[in-house]
């Protein structure tokens, strides 16, 4: 089985992170994103078709989604560390 990505869930109260591979088929009901690509008509049509809701952060207001941003930073740091470790120990 091949996975192409995952979904990072973060509990905003406890900051507990858990990741599920995309093949698990979770249904997302709400999104919070920036005003970039997520506000295009293509995305908006998809939200409406799937009966999902979205809220947007203010321009440059990364603090509005700080828990998720910090979680992404943590996961990327772990991935970089694992890749560097694998490169160092490669035979």
Image: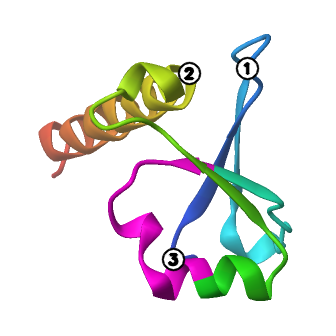
Mark 2 surroundings: few (<14), some (14-19) or many (≥20) residues within 10 A: some
Coloration of the structure image: rainbow
Q: Position of residue 12 (x, y in %)?
A: 73, 20
Mark 3 surroundings: few (<14), some (14-19) or many (≥20) residues within 10 A: few
Q: Pointer 1: what residue?
A: 12
Look at the image and tell me in which quarter the N terminus lies: bottom right
What residue range appears in magenta?
A: 32-44
Marks 2 and 1 close (CB-CB < 8 Å) = yes
Q: Pointer 2: what residue?
A: 67
Q: Residue at x 84, y 66 (%)?
A: 26
Q: Which mark is residue 4?
A: 3
Mark 1 surroundings: few (<14), some (14-19) or many (≥20) residues within 10 A: few
Picture quadrant of residue 59: top left
Magenta segment: does it hold 37? yes
Q: Residue at x 78, y 11 (%)?
A: 14
Marks 3 and 2 close (CB-CB < 8 Å) = no
Magenta segment: does it hold 55? no
Q: Residue at x 26, y 44 (%)?
A: 83
Q: Mark 3 vs mark 2: which is more N-terminal?
A: 3
């Amino acid at each position: 089985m091949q996975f192409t990505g995952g979904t990072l869930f973060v509990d905003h109260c406890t900051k507990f992170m858990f990741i599920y591979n995309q093949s698990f088929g979770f249904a997302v009901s709400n999104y919070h994103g920036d005003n970039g690509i997520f506000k295009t008509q293509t995305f908006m049509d998809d939200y409406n078709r799937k009966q999902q809701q979205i809220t947007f952060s203010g321009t440059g207001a990364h603090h509005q989604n700080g828990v998720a941003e910090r979680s992404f930073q943590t996961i990327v740091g772990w991935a970089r560390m694992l890749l560097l470790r694998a490169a160092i120990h490669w035979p």
